[in-house]
Amino acid sequence: MAQQESIIKLKGKIGDLTFYKTKTGYQARQVTGVSSDRIANDPKFQRTRENNAEFGTGGAAAKRLRQAFRPLILLTYDTKMPNRLFSRMMRILRADAINARGERKVLAENLGPLRQFNFNIAAELSNTLFAKPDVAIDRTAGTVNLTIEALRPSLAVAAPQGATHFQLNFGASAVDFDSEDMSEMATTQSESFALKEMVIDSQTLSVNLANPGELPVFVLFGITFYQEVNTILYPLNNGAYNAISIIQIAIM
């Protein structure tokens, strides 16, 4: 380890030298590490290759979900959501008891950890909307229907300060984790309701899926808040209080 004695103190990396500061002053050291060729071929790094392969598989699966759910995810704001989703996906991957380590996959029967996943950790759906929707999926017809009973906003909606209206959002997607094709999501939403209304009538929201086949069908549901200013509804605080959750995963 070399000590920097120059009046110019460096921090960072230049070539294969790294400059940094410690309690004893500024230091410099040569960057060392294992070559990519050795990691790819040395038997001692077999476990590393397996881990890398599964990180890649888990990352790709999490990205596929984010792409499929993008229309509803954009209604929320949570910068740590991708990391939380990736963590759940790795749990699912490691639950594969069929394939060898390093080749494990995201299997439909192991998707349980994604149920009730909240895309906005600051506004969990169960703490924001106190109403349980009923979901009916018809794979043959390609329809997904969601019904929510009549509700009283003052009791059923935990609205953030400043909100005057809310809207219910619903979507479904059949996701193929073994294909590189983009999974499409069908979405719809209710009309906007004033929070001061006494009772909101029962609502039924419907979407159509093109040929879901035997793929797992993800159903997302949530609530978004707005503030009315001069008869115009504005999204409240860029979606920071909006809740979107995976409420059901239907597998064959």
Image (cartoon, rainbow, N blue to C red):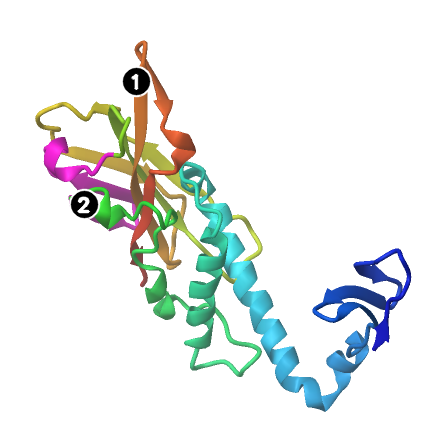
In front: 227, or 107?
227
Q: Is residue 27 left or right of residue 69?
A: right
Task: Read off the magenta span.
Answer: 131-159
Q: Quadrant of the C terminus?
A: bottom left
Quadrant location of residue 162?
top left
Callout 2 secondary element: loop
Q: Quadrant of the N terminus?
A: bottom right
Determine if residue 183 is in view.
no
- Using the numbered discs, state the Cα–Cα distance from disc 2 to disc 1 in whole angstroms: 27 Å
Q: Is residue 48 left or right of residue 149?
A: right
- Residue beneath label 1, please? 228
Q: Would you say residue 107 sits in the magenta stretch?
A: no
What's the mark number on residue 133?
2
What's the mark number on residue 187?
none
Q: Residue at x 77, y 67 (%)?
A: 25
Residue 124, position in %: x, y? 29, 48
Amino acid carrying label 2: it is Pro
Residue 140, position in %: x, y? 30, 49
Q: Dots 2 and 1: beta carbons under 8 Å?
A: no
Q: Residue at x 46, y 68 (%)?
A: 106
In front: 195, or 223?
195
Mark in front: 2 vs 1: 1
User: Could you classify mark 2 by the number of other residues whose Cα lies within 10 Å: few (under 14), some (14-19), or many (20 or more)?
Assistant: some
Name the N-terminal-most of marks 2 and 1.
Answer: 2
Amino acid carrying label 1: it is Glu
Q: Residue at x 18, y 26 (%)?
A: 195
In front: 44, or 33?
33
Residue 29 vertical placement versus 123 (above, below) = below
In front: 39, or 252?
39
